[in-house]
Amino acid sequence: MVAMDQRESLRTIFRSETGAEVDDATLVAFKLAVARVLSPYASALLVDRPFGLRPTLEAGVLDPSCALIVADDRLVQERWGVVDDTYLDSGLDLAAAREAGAVALKLLVIWRDDGDLQRRLQMTREFIAAAHAAGLLAIVEGVVRADADRREEAILDAARELGACEPDLYKAEVPLAGRGPAEAITAGARAITDVVPCPWVVLSSGVAAADFAGAVEAACRGGASGFLAGRAVWTDAIPAVRDDDWDGALRRISVPRLQALGEIVDRVVG
């Protein structure tokens, strides 16, 4: 599954990869290209409401074989900064999303062991209940904010506590950020499998693109069901674009990568 719900983070990626500061129209154009080029090779595409949902639907670029997932999170994020916190997106009409063809919603939860943890857990439970009431599946994504020496423990704590809210699918960071022996990544994935009472997949943020394929394989051997990833799939296409041909860059770089990742999941998970 391909994640294309980045907002200010996508603007930051463009600046990092090209040195240019891009406007909203460029973000939308890139999101449409990703949907048009990659959705025939993906089982699902995750889009955001502010830049992705309406343009994707109006342009009709989503392949019929690709399921639609909509992000139901409002991000607390300074321009050029990381996501600091999240809230439910009050501007998203869940019934309208379902009528438009969405099959699932996704909520990003920033997990940190602080005084606001209970508020985030309650938000997660409310999100899952609202998604189910609207006839949609609920995907919860846990991203931790913790010191490096506590990161792996925090990933497991987040999986345990957010998993206890009973989402339909959990989305987790790759153990060890995809670095280190495959056996260690698999062991970390197995620990997540042991505490999450539902299928789970890995995301690619924080993992070098060159490491992601191996990380996916190792995580799947530890019980992950696949991936819901964006950066490791399409970031390298951004600096490779020629004459504003986003489609061409994505076909050259991202389609083979997505196909290879899918083959790994098919081989390991079945």
Image (tube, rainbow, N blue to C red):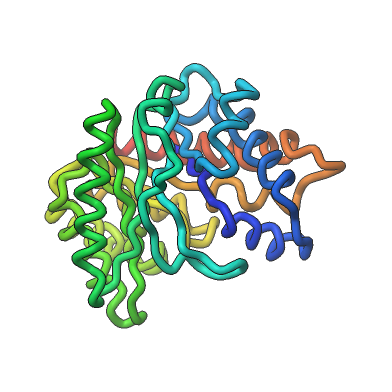
Name the residue located 42 percent from the left edge and 28 percent from the top edge: 97
Residue furthest to the right in view is 243
Using the rendered view, name the quadrant where residue 190 is placed. Answer: bottom left
Q: Nearer the viewer, residue 190 or 102?
A: 102
Instruction: Where is residue 215? Give x, y as percent.
Output: 39, 55
Instruction: Where is residue 34? Give x, y as percent.
Output: 62, 37
Q: Nearer the viewer, residue 219 or 102?
A: 102
Q: Nearer the viewer, residue 79 or 220?
A: 79
* Position of the C terminus by quadrant: top left
Name the residue located 48 percent from the left edge and 43 percent from the top edge: 3
Relative to residue 59, is residue 209 drawn left or right? Answer: left
Relative to residue 16, is residue 225 drawn left or right? Answer: left
Relative to residue 200, is residue 41 drawn left or right? Answer: right
Q: Nearer the viewer, residue 99 or 177?
A: 99
Number of numbered discs visible in the structure rendering:
0
Measured along the vertical axis of the image, is residue 91 above or below residue 214? above
Name the residue located 78 percent from the left edge and 61 percent from the top edge: 20
Using the rendered view, name the quadrant where residue 99 is placed. Answer: top left
